[in-house]
Amino acid sequence: MSDPTARVSVADSGVDVVDVGTLPPLGVVPRRMHAQVVRQSRYGDPATAFAHEVIDTPALGRGEVLIAVMAAGVNYNNVWAARGYPVDQVATRQRQGEVEDFHVGGSDASGIVYAIGEAVDGVAVGDEVVVHPGVWDENDSWVQAGRDAMIGPSAKIWGYDTNFGSFGQFARVQAHQLLPKAPHLSWAQAAAPTLVGTTAYRMLHGWAGNTVTDGDLVLVWGGSGGLGTQASQLVAAAGGRAVAVVSDDARGAFAMKYGAIGYINRREFDHWGVPPLVDDSAGQKAWTAGARAFGKRLWEIAGGREDPAIVFEHPGASTVPTSVFVCRPGGMVVICAGTTGFDAMVDLRYHWTRQKRLQGSHGTNDEQARVYNQLVVDGRIDPCVGRVLPMDDIPLSHAQMGRGEEVFGNTVHLLGAPDPEDGRRD
Ligand code: NAP
């Protein structure tokens, strides 16, 4: 990562600011830009934590690139950033030497390269790109040793841990994050899937010994959501069978449209959350009956007494006990979040005797992002756009996401693109 104090402005002094939905001439960078900004004094409900402001266009440092954002995808991480919980991102960055007292989030973008910082090769002004969310310090000794960069101590998520993500007209990225935009997609479609898709790719293909293979049964929580719709498609692309978990039939139908072979409505069960402790025999019996009934429903969809080789987890506290219970011996519960809570419980008796793996997973490295993006470019993965909204609905979409509403694929906001269909090249 660049030294924050060594960045230089790339703005053209002749242009102050341009309207949302328009672009300055290629390569001309305005001094200021429109952005949806979170400030510490507004932390809380995303509906009011974000506000439209005009702020200085970000400066660039070594290895960095400025892109004009055409469209920005919404992810749950900026619900957390808007709440200032569990991490106060502004305070965290200030402790690390950054000067800004605000957060411009946004971890998915489609856009056009407008300016290039020092020591960047293979990127040109005018390139049409999407952005993967993994960032790290090129001087990190872990990265320099050639290890998985996303595990290194400097690894961060762009537009969540870092400032100047895609919710402003110009975004600052590290050059290695750039990927070619799929020509057949509009700007809006292209901005939708990369964060959730690359995360799902790493979860399903990144953990040797438990990668998804032909015929595998995979249980996918939140099957109609951003991660879930990508996961089911990736499972199908690998020859596996995804079973989605959802909370109503409309969400189930949506999950099946994107590759799931069937769905379980979690509202039909009530054993969620931390199970009764081991010595509570009656409580354990009741909890186990609930978890078994859930597993039986899975068998009905699988067409036999088959347990999942992989459980694709992110709800966390509410569902981890069930995920570990139903996972097949030698299988893996792979988890990237704890949306319902961080205090999950694992009954270790079953965990070790049945030799299951509980694997954390976070973000993506460059190689995984490139393989995933090629699947999108080849038309094998649908970006799964739920809806396209104007820039000033960014507070609304995050508030709805935080309440669990509108969970149908990915929401996208238009910034530079004038309309949802713009940007297709064939
Ligand atoms: P999303 O589109 O809002 O989907 C969330 C899903 O969770 C919904 O489909 C919902 O489905 C399900 N859900 C909500 N409450 C639940 C409960 N009590 N039990 C079971 N399922 C429940 O969000 P997303 O983009 O998929 O992201 C999900 C989480 O993953 C977020 O916390 C996000 O921050 C995290 N994430 C982490 C990474 C990473 O790299 N670590 C990357 C991407 C996302 P139903 O209500 O229909 O069941």
Image (cartoon, rainbow, N blue to C red):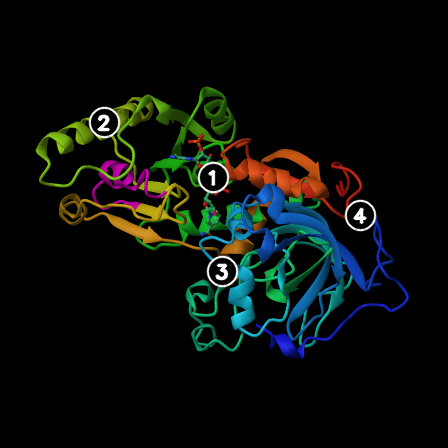
As measured in the structure, the alpha-carbon distance from the residue carrying label 2 to the one carrying label 4 is 52 Å
Q: Is mark 1 within 8 Å of ligand 1?
A: no
- Estimate the x, y position of residue 21 in percent, counting from the top left: 81, 45
Nearer-N-terminus badge (3/1): 1
Q: Residues within 10 Å of mark 1 (few under 14, many from 20)?
A: some
Question: Which of pointers 1 and 4 indicates the residue nearer the eye?
Answer: 4
- Residue lying at the far right in this picture: please name it: 14
Question: Cβ of disc 2 within 8 Å of ligand 1?
Answer: no
Of the numbered discs 2 and 4, the one sitting upstream in the chain is: 4
Quarter of the image where ligand 1 sits: top left
Distance from Cα at disc 1 to Cα at disc 4 = 38 Å
Seen from the viewer's position, the closer of residues 213 and 300 is 300
Measuring 44% from the left and 22% from the top, which residue is drawn there? 248
Q: Secondary structure at mark 2?
A: helix
Disc 4 from disc 3: Cα separation = 32 Å
Q: Nearer the viewer, mark 2 or mark 3?
A: 2
| Magenta highlight on residue 34 | no
Q: Which residue type does callout 2 highlight?
A: Gly
Tell me which segment is drawn in magenta: 316-332
How packed mark 2 is, by other alpha carbons closer than 10 Å (few <14, some 14-19, many 20 or more), is: some
Residue at disc 3, CB closer than 8 Å to ligand 1: no
Callout in the foreground (3, 1):
3
Earlier-in-chain disc, 4 versus 3: 4
Q: Secondary structure at mark 4?
A: loop
SS for callout 1? helix
Asked if disc 1 and disc 2 are in contact, CB closer than 8 Å, the reply is no
- Quadrant of the image containing the N terminus: bottom right
Residue 330 counted in the magenta span? yes
Q: Which label number is shown at residue 237?
A: 1
Residue type beneath disc 1: Ala
